[in-house]
Image (cartoon, helix red, strand yellow):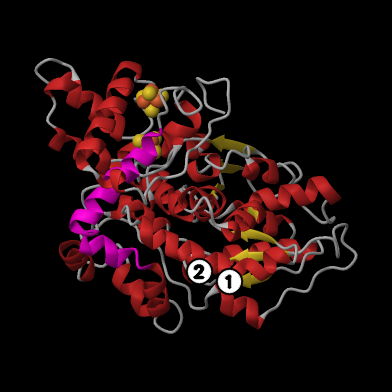
Amino acid sequence: MSEGSLEAPVRHPIDWKNPDFYDEAKLDEELRRVFDICHGCRRCFNLCDSFPRLFDLIDEAPSEELDTVDSKDFKPVVDACTLCDMCFMVKCPYVPPHEFNLDFPHLMLRYRAVEAKKKGAPFAEKQLTATDRNGKLAAGALSGVANWATDRGNGLTRPLMEKAADVHRDAALPKFAKKTLVASAKANPPKADDKAPAAGKKKAVIYATCYGNYNTPEVGEALLGVLAKNGVAAEVVYPECCGMPQMEQGAIQDVAEKAKRVAASLERYVDDGYEVIALVPSCALMLKFEWPLILPDDERIKKLSAATRDASEYVVRLAKEFGLADGLKPLDGPVTVHIACHSRAQNMGQKATEMLKLIPEIELTVVERCSGHGGSWGVMKENFEVGIKVGRPVFRQAKANGKAKYVASECPLAGLHIAQGMEMSAKDADEKASLPETTPHPITLFAKAYGL
Ligand code: SF4
Ligand code: SF4
């Protein structure tokens, strides 16, 4: 529930099929209506860089009001939005059902959709976010070459990438895996423990997500292990990417087409009573909430949305409904867990925290604030430094006064960004050397506590 409102927010479907959605005069009218309310309210001043840009723009205008701001100056405000959804989900008292009917992130999305319709998505971003094409090329046999080329220490390729693709030369980029999650699950199908409390009572299929399939198969492998230990033999499927990267570019039609294809391919599981576990919170958010707002009349998507779970959410439910299998042992050090914006935006409570608290004697610090990465947004040349600035409070808190052995985040890109931010903000070589080496998904720590 939003901080300033007594009622749960209601999100209206995105009206992207209506020609008025792309009418620039109507868009400008709506931007001015919303920006004026925000300027009077200012609650979101510290959530991201969009709001400070907006407030400075208005405060520095001749009349110090919106009437003397030129609409062409709105673009930097929109450009700074990572669509993290935090203003809508946790701050804004004026979201529907309030009569002001404010949905700031979806207004930013509309602006981008209008731009994309006019000019097409920027070439460089389009290439970077073609996650399935890139993953098929770079994961597997060629992962060594791909990882060499994209390594941030590579003084040969990274300046070229910056020039050709606008990717900041210092931004950490995800590594590609030698074996995709789908291939690894096929090679080692999980064997469910038939004596576990939940044995035979649950059916689950893991939607690998592009990141979970091509970049971090170890997260899905950890989840498969935890589920098998608890009597659930999950299958892994990966029809294609959920379209979050295209959503960030305002390419709503592309997202809708992906949604329809993925929902068609998962339908037989949903109809057969399976729950669908999405490995990355942004993707779970797409399946649960964004797709039904883009295609509100599609019955397949409604069914899939109702069956979708986040990974930590699923494990917590399993624990509540049946109790967990024995065997969890304390970890070998304190943990900081970062709660990703797109986990918060699923309105389900802090499931990663709840899950980690099931590990005996855990020493846990929770950081619930935006890390500033914003998907592919944060690696672009013009955004990388803003992303590091936005994430600074998280980097500070994540160190938990130097105690944390593990800094975990459910969002793999946030994890990567936090690791880099902690390293960049370390005061000296000693502090750098004491930082955690990896930023695992909480399920990886859970699997470790099981000794898997
Ligand atoms: S969605 Fe996130 S990044 Fe965008 S304006 Fe709201 S808080 Fe800022
Ligand atoms: S989005 Fe809502 S809470 Fe945030 S500044 Fe605007 S009106 Fe205020």
- Quadrant for the C terminus, please: bottom right
- In the rendered image, residue 405, in percent from the top left (x then y), is placed at 56, 47
Classify the position of ligand 2 by quadrant: top left, top right, bottom left or bottom right. Answer: top left
Residue 445 visible in the snapshot: no
Residue behind label 2 places its C-beta within 8 angstroms of ligand 1: no
- Identify the amino acid type marked 2: Arg
Residue at the disc numbered 1: 265
- Identify the amino acid type marked 1: Ser
Left or right: where does residue 65 sit relative to residue 398? Answer: left
Q: Is residue 68 above or below residue 111?
A: above
Give, as a single range, the part of the protein colored magenta.
Answer: 103-130
Q: Residue at x 70, y 52 (%)?
A: 314
124 falls in the magenta region: yes
Residue 96 visible in the snapshot: yes
- In the rendered image, residue 12, in percent from the top left (x then y), is placed at 47, 39
Q: Residue at x 76, y 64 (%)?
A: 203
Badge 2, how many Cα within 10 Å: few under 14, some, many 20+?
Answer: some
Q: Is residue 10 above or below residue 157?
A: above
Q: Secondary structure at mark 2?
A: helix
Are circles 1 and 2 on residues that touch, CB within 8 Å?
Answer: yes
Residue at the disc numbered 2: 261
Along the line of sight, the residue nearer the viewer: 166 or 27: 27
Badge 1, how many Cα within 10 Å: few under 14, some, many 20+?
Answer: some
Identify the mark at residue 114; answer none if there is no mark.
none
Q: Quadrant of residue 395?
A: top left
**Alpha-carbon span between mark 1 and mark 2:** 6 Å
4 falls in the magenta region: no
